[in-house]
C-alpha cells in the first residue's frame, strides 16, 4: 500500500508540474483549445491554485462547467515588449487602433449571448461615434474592416468568441459578410488580468482627468501588499511582496540579473529561505534552475512553458539576432556601434541575396539590425548603453558555427 501511495504521490507531483508549465504558457486555457491540458488543470485545480498563490501571488480561476481556466499574471513591473499579436503570417503586434477596437468590441459583446459580425460592427460604430476621443469606425474602409477582423480573430483564439457559421476573414472583403457568433461571457469577463477594476478607478477619480500611466498604475495596485507602496506595509506584507516580486520575474522573464533587483529583493533571493523556496518551486514545476554569478534563469527541458524560442530559425530577425550577437559580444564592455552592426547586416544580406528578401532594400540592413536587437533585448542577451549594443552575461551561452548553420540556419547553445 505504501508503494502505491508513493507512486500516486509522484504521479500527482508530475501532473501538477506539467499543469503549472501549461498555465504559464497559456494563462487563458479553454477546453475547446486543448481538451487534454484543460482536463489536467481541472483535476489538479486545488493544489495548482494554492501553488500559484503561495509562490507567485497570482490568482487562478478554473471553471469546469464553462470550460476555461484563467491565471491572472499580474505584475507591477510588467514588460512592455509582449504585445497582443495579429493572427496573420507576419504576427505583427496590435497597434493603437486595434487596441481601441478590441476594448470597444469587448464592451459591446458583454450584453449579447449571440450576434453576427454585421450587428456587432454596427454596435461598435455607434459606440465609437458617442465618444469623440475614439475617432469613429468606418466599415466602408477595407483597412478598418481588416483591423476589426484582427480583433475578432484574436477573441476567437482566446475562446471569448465562437464562430457558429461563416468565416470572420470574409468581413475583410465585404461589409455585408454573414458570420454568426456565440459569445462566451465568462471568458470575456476574465480577459483583463488586473487586481483593480477600471470602473472602480474611474469612480475614485470622478471628473478629475488622469494621465494614462496613472490609470494603468491604479488598476495594477495589489492591496495584499499594503497598497501603492511598502512604506506602510507590515513586515508580513513586505516579506510576501519580496517573495512574489522575485519569483514572478524568475518564472516570467527569460533571465533575472542581480543588478536588476533592488537591494531588498537581492537580499531575499540570496537568503536561506529565499533560495529554498526558489529551488523547491522550480523543482515542483519541472524546471531546471541555473544560477550564475550574474543571476538566475529557469530552463524547461520539455519546452512546455516556452512561448518564444532562441535560437530559432522561425524568423529572419531571430536568425540575424544570433549572427549579430557575435559582433555584439566581440565588442566587449564598450559595446558595438550601430554603424558596425549595420555593416555586419549588410554583409550578411549581400552574402545571401535570396535570404530575408523583405530586408533586401536600401534601408533593409538598418531595419534588420533594429528587429534583431529587439529580439536580443527581449531575451535578456543584450542591452543598449549610450546608443551602443552591449552583450549581457547570458549571451555567453550561444555560439554559431557558421552563417549557413544558422539557417541561414541553425545554431547551438
Image: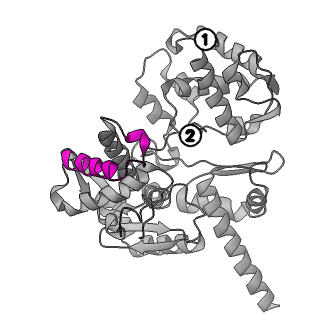
**Mark 2 and mark 1: span between their CA atoms?**
31 Å
Of the residues tagged 2 and 1, which is closer to the observer? 1
Q: Is residue 365 left or right of residue 243?
A: left
Q: Is residue 1 left or right of residue 411?
A: right
Q: Is residue 281 above or below residue 50?
A: below
Q: Is residue 398 above or below residue 165?
A: below
Q: How far across and down, in percent of the image, does residue 110 sit?
A: 73, 26
On residue 366, the disc is none
Q: Is residue 338 magenta?
A: no
Q: Is residue 183 left or right of residue 207?
A: right
Q: How far across and down, in percent of the image, does residue 381 sit?
A: 34, 58
Q: Main secondary structure of the magenta part?
A: helix
Which of the two residues, 41 or 208, is positioned nearer the viewer here?
41
Secondary-structure class at tag 1: loop
Say which residue label 2 marks.
194
Say which quadrant the N terminus sits in.
Answer: bottom right
Q: Is residue 309 visible?
A: yes
Q: Which residue is the extreme one toward the left?
A: 334
Secondary-structure class at tag 2: loop
Q: Which residues are magenta?
A: 339-360
Q: How far across and down, in percent of the image, does residue 32 sit?
A: 78, 48
Which of the two residues, 157 or 69, is positioned nearer the viewer here?
157
Q: Is residue 358 magenta?
A: yes
User: Looking at the rendering, which quadrant does residue 160 occupy?
Assistant: top right
Say which residue label 1 marks.
138
Question: Which residue is drawn at the image coordinates 23% and 48% (left, top)?
Answer: 343
User: Looking at the rendering, which quadrant does residue 398 occupy?
Assistant: bottom left
Q: Is residue 8 left or right of residue 336?
A: right
Question: Which residue is drawn at the image coordinates 73% and 29% (left, top)?
Answer: 168
Amino acid at each position: 500500500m505504501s508503494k502505491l501511495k508513493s507512486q500516486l504521490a509522484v504521479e500527482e507531483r508530475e501532473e501538477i508540474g506539467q499543469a503549472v508549465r501549461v498555465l504559464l504558457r497559456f494563462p487563458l486555457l479553454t477546453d475547446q483549445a486543448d481538451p487534454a491540458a484543460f482536463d489536467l488543470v481541472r483535476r489538479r485545480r486545488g493544489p495548482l491554485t494554492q501553488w500559484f498563490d503561495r509562490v507567485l501571488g497570482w490568482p487562478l480561476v478554473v471553471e469546469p462547467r464553462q470550460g476555461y481556466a484563467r491565471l491572472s499574471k499580474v505584475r507591477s513591473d510588467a514588460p512592455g515588449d509582449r504585445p497582443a499579436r495579429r493572427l496573420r503570417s507576419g504576427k505583427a503586434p496590435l497597434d493603437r487602433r486595434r487596441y481601441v477596437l478590441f476594448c470597444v468590441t469587448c464592451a459591446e459583446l458583454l450584453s449579447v449571448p449571440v450576434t453576427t459580425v454585421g450587428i456587432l460592427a454596427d454596435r461598435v460604430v455607434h459606440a465609437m461615434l458617442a465618444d469623440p476621443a475614439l475617432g469613429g469606425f468606418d466599415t466602408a474602409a477595407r483597412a478598418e474592416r481588416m483591423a476589426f477582423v484582427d480583433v475578432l480573430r484574436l477573441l476567437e483564439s482566446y475562446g471569448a468568441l465562437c464562430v457558429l457559421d461563416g468565416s470572420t476573414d470574409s468581413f475583410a472583403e465585404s461589409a455585408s459578410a454573414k458570420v454568426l457568433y456565440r459569445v462566451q461571457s465568462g471568458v470575456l469577463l476574465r480577459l483583463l488580468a488586473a487586481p483593480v477594476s477600471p470602473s472602480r478607478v474611474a469612480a475614485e477619480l470622478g471628473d478629475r482627468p488622469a494621465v494614462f500611466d496613472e490609470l494603468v498604475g491604479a488598476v495594477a495596485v495589489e492591496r495584499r501588499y499594503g497598497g501603492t507602496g511598502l512604506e506602510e506595509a507590515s513586515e508580513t506584507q513586505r516579506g510576501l511582496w519580496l517573495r512574489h516580486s522575485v519569483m514572478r520575474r524568475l518564472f516570467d522573464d527569460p533571465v533575472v540579473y542581480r543588478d536588476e533587483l533592488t537591494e531588498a529583493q537581492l537580499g531575499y533571493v540570496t537568503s536561506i529561505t529565499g533560495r529554498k523556496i526558489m529551488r523547491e518551486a522550480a523543482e515542483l514545476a519541472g524546471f531546471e534552475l541555473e544560477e550564475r554569478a550574474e543571476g538566475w534563469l529557469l530552463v524547461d527541458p520539455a519546452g512546455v512553458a516556452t512561448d518564444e524560442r532562441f535560437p530559432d530559425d522561425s524568423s529572419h530577425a531571430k536568425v540575424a539576432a544570433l549572427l549579430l550577437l557575435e559582433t555584439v559580444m566581440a565588442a566587449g564592455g564598450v559595446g558595438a556601434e550601430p554603424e558596425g552592426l549595420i555593416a555586419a547586416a549588410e554583409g550578411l544580406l549581400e552574402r545571401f541575396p535570396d535570404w530575408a528578401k523583405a530586408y533586401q532594400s536600401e534601408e533593409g540592413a538598418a531595419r534588420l539590425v533594429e528587429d534583431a536587437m529587439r529580439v536580443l533585448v527581449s531575451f535578456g542577451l543584450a542591452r543598449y548603453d549610450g546608443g551602443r549594443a552591449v552583450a549581457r552575461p547570458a549571451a555567453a551561452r550561444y555560439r554559431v558555427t557558421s552563417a549557413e548553420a544558422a539557417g541561414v540556419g541553425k545554431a547551438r547553445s
